[in-house]
Amino acid sequence: MSLNRLIFYCAMIGGWAAFAGWFLSETLLFRRSFHEGFWGFMVILLAAGLVGGCIAGGLTLLGGLASGTLRGQAHRFLPGFLGGAIGGIAGSLPGNSLYLVFEFKLFQLIGWTMVGLAIGAVEGIYDKSPKKLRNGLIGGGIGGFLGGLLFILLGATSMAERAAGFVILGVCIGCFIGLAQVMLKEAWLTVEAGFRPGRQLVLSLPEIIMGTSEKASLPFIAFGAKGVEPIHVRIKRRQDGSYLLEDNHTRTGTFVNGAQVQGDVVLRNDDLIQLGVNVVRFREVLKHVPDGDENRRAGAAPATPVARPAASPIPAVVAVSLPPVRSAAPMAAPVARPNPPIPPRVAPRPGPSAAVSPVPKAPPPAPANAPRPPARPALPTPAVPNSPIVAAAPSGVPGCPVCGRAGVVVPQSGKRRCVSCGILY
């Protein structure tokens, strides 16, 4: 489960476990008539033991269920219950003894605080984890003090008051134990992809196992078991505070940031661990290995560098000297030849049957203020053989030696062809 849900579930389990302890104590103890003197003192101790045992057993079981399954973690409840019962009796003994002697409520508050300390220490002792022991003592002590204070303010003289007081005590102890585990964490794992993404596991044990086994601290079953062996990966905490990942000689292998692990590898913050179809991110509060450390792999075979193609240099611009362009040989001046005489055209006389075409009328004059139409560009005069209109060649362009008209350039010949005479010149 995620770390935020861990705090919520710790508070819920603590409250319901305390309610179960209250129900057992009411059924077995408070229905008797001995409430005063020595027997009354013993009833209070046994009630504290039942409530402490239920709270400690529930929280110890939850610590295993945070990442495992009920089938593999159910054995944690009985040791946690026994440890909590012993701690509850031992914690409430000095406080209630002083309260009976001096009748001062402060001593009773000290007793509930010691009960919280004892409950918080059970899970750390069971898992043999100094970090869990430290965090449990801090959270259990704070929760026992606040819950005991509210328990005393309620009075706890009637059955309803005792029920409310025990439930509040369990909620406070569970909530602050979970809060201490989350806030004081140093390193944790988060499942990014695969079986149940979003799960988180605080690395509070000396060794963490990931795989399909029931003994795994972070198990992967169902779809996530594809390509994962029972004990696939071990994560060990070294004396300097860094974490070492070890592949258990698996067939599918383990990958860190896309590179296959050969032996051991020292984890650094934000590393991605892949086993089968699952991707797990490693995070730590204190970076023991710098991000740019190239020698962070201890005992691992050197990774084969990926051969990258060398960058091709940019070709320099080379100035190429071209041979000079030879100018075309000057053309010979055209030989002036006299133009052949053009016979005058005689207008035909209209016969008797020819229709006389009407003379077109001149258009009316435009007004003085009328806008003038834009001038149209002059169209080239077509060259018509034997036409009296001669299209003289412009200046600088050689004309036809026969008619003097401008010829058309013939491609790839350097000559011109007269459109009127049809000769090349």
Image (cartoon, rainbow, N blue to C red):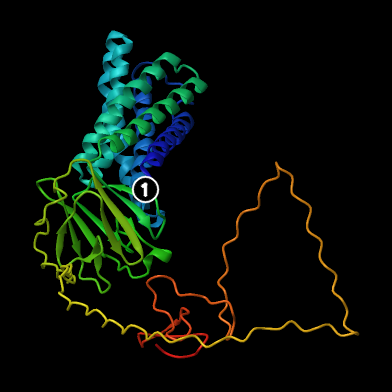
Name the residue nearer the viewer: 221 or 150. 221
Number of marks = 1
Which residue is label 1 attached to? 66
Q: Residue 233 falls in which quadrant of the image? A: bottom left
Q: Residue 149 falls in which quadrant of the image? A: top left
Mark yes or no: residue 194 visible. Answer: yes
Name the residue nearer the viewer: 166 or 189. 189
Task: Give the image location of residue 319, x and y in percent.
Answer: 15, 70
Residue furthest right as drawn: 353
Graded by Cα atoms within 10 Å as few (under 14), some (14 to 19) or many (20 or more), the crowding at tag 1 reads: many
Q: Which residue is painted at 66% across and 49% down in the image?
A: 372
Mark yes or no: residue 32 visible. Answer: no
Q: Which residue is painted at 44% across and 23% down in the image?
A: 165
Task: Give the image location of residue 98, x and y in percent.
Answer: 26, 14
Whether residue 170 sits left or right of residue 345 in the image: it is left
Whether residue 34 sits left or right of residue 218 in the image: it is right
Whether residue 242 sits left or right of residue 144 in the image: it is left
Q: Residue 274 falls in which quadrant of the image? A: bottom left
Q: Which residue is painted at 26% across and 65% down in the image?
A: 232
Task: Give the image location of residue 199, x and y in percent.
Answer: 37, 50
Q: Which residue is painted at 27% across and 25% down in the image?
A: 114
Task: Give the image location of residue 271, x and y in percent.
Answer: 24, 54
Compared to residue 342, the image places residue 228 above or below, namely: above
Name the residue nearer the viewer: 106 or 13. 13
Compared to residue 26, the image places residue 329 above or below, namely: below
Amino acid tagged 1? Ala
